[in-house]
Image (tube, rainbow, N blue to C red):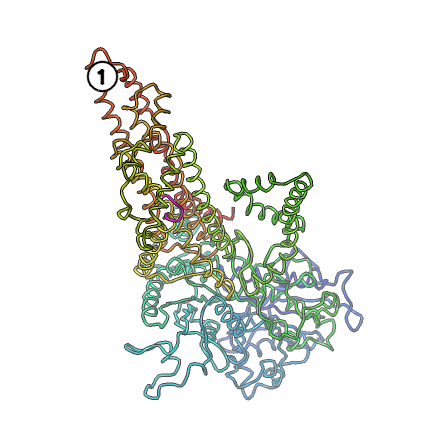
Amino acid sequence: MEIVAVMLPGGPYSENVESRRRGRYAVLAGLNASRLSPVDTEHLGYFFPPARRGPNAKPPEPIPYEWFEPTLDARRGDDGRSPRVLVMWLQSEAFDAEPLARMGALAKPFLEAGANWRVLGPNGSDGLKAMIDEAAASDFKGKVPAPRMRFYSLYATVPDSVLLGDTEASLADFFDARGVTLVRTIGNDGNLAKSLIDELMLRGLKALKSEELGPPDPKSERSLYWQTCHPRDGEKPRHSLSHVAVVAEWDTLYGRSLRREFRPAPGERGFCVDSFNYVRGLDGQLPAGSQGAPDSAAGAKPAQGDKDATRRKDGTLVERAEGQSQFDYLRRLAVQMREKDRYVRAASADGTGLRAIGVLGNDVHDKLLVLQALKPEFPNAIFFTTDLDARFLHPREQAWTRNLIVASNFGLRLRDELQGGAPPFRDSYQVSAFLATRLAMNDAQQPSRPVSQAAVAQWFGTPRVFEIGRTEAFEFLGRPANEGVQRARADLCRGPRWTECKDIHPPASARYPMPREATLILVASLLVLALWAPALFISVGARRFLGRFVARAPDGSALLARYAALAVLVVLLQLELPLWLAAHWQPFAEWLTREGKPLTAFEGISLWPTEAIRVLNLVLCLYLLIRGWCALTRNVDEITREFRLGSTRRELIAEQREAQARLRWWQKLAQVFSMRFEPAAGRSKQAALGMPAPALDFWKRYVAQNRLSARLLRTTAYVAAALPWSYLVVLAFDEERAVPYRGDLSLAVHDGLRIPSLVAMYFLVFFVVDATAFCVGFVRGLREQAANWPEATLDLFEAQTGIPRAHLDNWVDLQFIALRTRSVTHLIYYPFIVISLLLLSRSAVFDQWTMPVSTIVLSVGGAIVALGCALALRLAAEASRRHALDLLKDALMRANAKAPVAPGEATPRQLELLQSRIENLRMGAFAPFWQQPLVKAVLLPFATLGGSTLLDYLALANI
């Protein structure tokens, strides 16, 4: 007969109840995977153990038990039999003192009857430490009936060196020397701390070994660590070691020991650790039925308690500093840590504060409360903890658990061959209990060949590292403890030899999607098409080049050859290139995500969507620049045709080139901004073009400063002036830079895109500002000139309207302004589009991004500049309309005063109709305000912020 004694916490609190529930479920799942089924599925038995002797001995508590028997397909043991299994559920608190002696006393009659006794316990590190203290006594050996009694430590994670005080090499050897057999079925906290240190270093924190800190200051009585991490006033930091805050429970050995693992040690890297403490039971929840606990029949109190619990979850409750709950301590702790962060930032060599915050404890409820209190105060810090729990993934906890780094000895399941069909568990300790149960049953079947501690230890050489996402805990591939150990073969993990399996854990999460080859080719083809098709669509020159390329073929065979060349080019672009990209997708994705973030879109743990949006923004800026210039050029060509300005324009361009050839280089550069070096138009030129000298000088200025080179120079000057001011704004807010990268490659990509995307966005914004401001000056200049148009233009409009040209100059001005501003006003969309994408790229939907105040200020500043220019254009256009109407009303008054109207003069009716047309002009900048593009453009960033916020809430709601 096999007896399995399972030690579970016996406390009345909710966490104790949940621990018992989880432990029982995991043990039953392990028995089921070992082909054992309960004899009675509806009832538990119980018995009273022998009472302890002594004056202060308490009556024994009943011990529940249940029987399990092998299923029909159960594996036989070495002796050809499949024994029945008796499972006892023991209260761990009953073994706090002298656990080995008490366990031996309980097991003695069963062992004497020939049963084998296997203990799934102790229940934690404190229980294991009590066993060590008892076994270390000089009179211990021989007190415990060790034969056929075996312990499986499934929850204790404190390292051997901490438990034994560096006096023994191995805990298994320590107990073996004293006649006790113990196997630890879970890794230790030292390995978890090392994996967390490695992970934090991948995310930008700097760690050093103690020997790398340099020699200590002989004049200081303080240790080298304190000299380095906590310099006194006036002392300069010795190294730029990153500061890490560790918030741990102080009333357990687990919490007290784990924080020390993050400090530098000989041969081990570490950080400057700032320690903060809390006491278990932060929620203050009392067990049901205890004094002061809320009762369901108490009327309003339970409802108020439930309401407070709900408000605490959404952060709207501020607790009073009284009562059972200790959450008010956490709020004050957050303030204390914020002050420490400011001090560290001021004293550190690199100007950074608390880069990471560790929350270490056994109670997951306490961890969640600590995270809830600290995450809003440190939105840019990296939070980390140990031991994976499914409660981290609950939608109501996402506001403070998203992006939490978790180092754990297990995930929520073992690999499929070992899981035995059981669903993923609720936490990693359940997996350890499941594994311990399977090991105990495997040892029962082959007692001559029990699993050794060395065989179990190899499974925990590489702890699992997770990042909590929106729907899953993403597991990163850890660094192998032994590079020579290869991945386990699946056949070793099945059947009776499963303990020889090299890796009991499931594969790490997929770092990138791997769709079908046809899908990859289709996506690559669409991307390639998106690169060249818009350029061909917007570029008149490209289309003309293709037309000339085909039209200039000397004969039919040459024409066929040119068509064939174009077909080959299209095939290379749209077939061969996508095929090549699809074939190289996997190695590219592997290189991009190795030791980096995964390629996921909405899981909330990847910066690659942000970088993709920044690449899109960069390409879009270039595209919009080209599109904007092409639109302005097409608009000028259209106006030239409609206004019959072709000859005048050519004459002005030719004269401008002649005049510019006589200027010095600095005068040519100054001409981009001012025309003071341009010679005035001569009388011959005035007579040839039919315009006065001021009008000719005005048009020459427009022609000279409207060139692409002039626009680019002015825009470059604006960008060069704006960048230093932007840098000063960033320095003024003194915000710590926070990039949620992982690995050098992701940081290099982020930094590599940072300056080009910023400069491209600035260039686009000021290109639009220049186009709009230049148009404002042109509109004002038209209003100031008395006669702006050549004879050919006035003849055209006189023929169209029948109104004498003396009254047409202002009407032609307004028509020109309407046509020109119809193109210019649409440019106002461009800055707001790229600003919206900039804001969207920093959405927390993608990763742990926050919106710096400096980014908001600069975005709002750029939008205000562009918006101000657009408003100035609107006001300038309306001023020109008013000016034209004032002059027209004066002419109408004069026409009404004359009776009859002389031949060749406008009639009052004609002037009234012209006035009506001017008043009803609704094109370009003359459109009603609510129909202006600037109104719609202003809404874009707000829609982006609102949309990204909505996405954040949807993600938190797991929708």
- Camera-nearest residue between 115 and 216: 216
Residue 13 makes an appearance in the image? no
Give left or right: position of 303 versus 194.
left
Q: Would you identify the image quadrant in which residue 594 lies?
A: bottom right
Which residues are drawn in magenta? 706-710
Residue at the extreme right: 80
398 or 556, which is in the foreground?
556
Which residue corresponds to mark 1? 895
Q: Quadrant of residue 431?
A: bottom right
Q: Where in the figure is residue 82, as x and y percent of width and height?
A: 76, 67
In this view of the protein, can residue 115 be seen by the observer?
yes
Instruction: Classify 502 as above or below 861.
Output: below
**Residue drawn at x 55%, y 85% as measured from the top left:** 168
Q: Viewer-proximal residue, 418 or 303?
A: 418
Q: Is residue 660 left or right of residue 56?
A: left
Q: How many marks?
A: 1
Dot 1, crowdedness within 10 Å: few (<14), some or many (≥20)?
Answer: some
Q: Please, which residue is most extreme toward the left here? A: 897
Instruction: Tell me the SS state at disc 1.
Output: helix
As displayed, is residue 366 above or below residue 484?
A: above
Does the stretch in magenta take in 472?
A: no
Position of residue 827 measured from the top left corner of the image (x, y, whole percent): 40, 41
Q: Quadrant of the N terminus?
A: bottom right
Looking at this rendering, what residue extends furthest in the front direction?
684
In this rendering, is residue 558 above or below 881? below
Task: Give residue 874's position: percent from left, percent from top.
Answer: 31, 36
Specify whether 657 is left or right of 266.
left
Where is residue 869 shown, x and y percent of the image? 31, 42
Residue 466 versus residue 784: which sits nearer the camera? 784
Q: Is residue 709 magenta?
A: yes
Q: Main secondary structure of the magenta part?
A: helix
Q: Amino acid at mark 1?
A: Ala
